[in-house]
Image (tube, grey):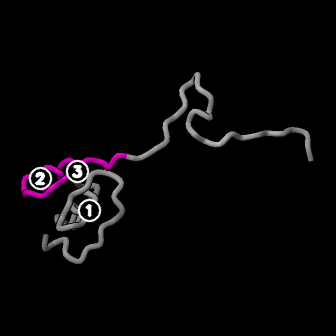
Amino acid sequence: MESMKGVRPEPVTGEFVIIGRRRYPAKQVGQVITRQDRRDFSTGEVLRAMTQLGFTCSPRPAAASAPLAGPCEPASATGAPPVHLTYGQV
């Protein structure tokens, strides 16, 4: 916790570690704690180590997205407004 004091969390786009009240990306935590380049360790290694130390770790946050239309459904099935195309008009 002391190592992460004063470090602003980067935007979380993948797995993260909760330190205090903040969510830090796992790679950021690994970089700060080990003082190594992020390419030198995997996210899984950071999550395992932090979990063994008693920190709460979570997988990638679920992305909220609109359902996609299937191959036999019209595009309007996604809830998107209809698009009207006109050809040959100026």
Q: Position of residue 11 (x, y in %)?
A: 36, 62
Secondary structure of the residue carrying tag 1 is strand
Q: Amino acid at mark 2?
A: Thr
Q: CA distance from mark 1 to mark 2?
A: 14 Å
Q: Position of residue 83 (x, y in %)?
A: 71, 41
Can you tell which mark lies on residue 24?
Answer: 1
Q: Position of residue 84 (x, y in %)?
A: 76, 40
- Residue that badge 3 annotates: 58
Q: Are marks 3 and 1 in contact (CB under 8 Å)?
A: no
- Residue that badge 2 annotates: 51
Dot 1 surroundings within 10 Å: few (below 14), some, or many (20 or more)? many
Q: Amino acid at mark 3?
A: Ser
Asked if residue 63 lies in the magenta stretch, the reply is no
Residue 74, placed above or below residue 4: above
Q: CA distance from mark 3 to mark 1?
A: 10 Å
Dot 2 surroundings within 10 Å: few (below 14), some, or many (20 or more)? some
Quadrant placement of the N terminus: bottom left
Please identify the quarter of the rendering in which residue 40 is found.
bottom left
Query: Magenta part of the protein: which range?
Result: 43-62
Residue 27, placed above or below residue 7: above
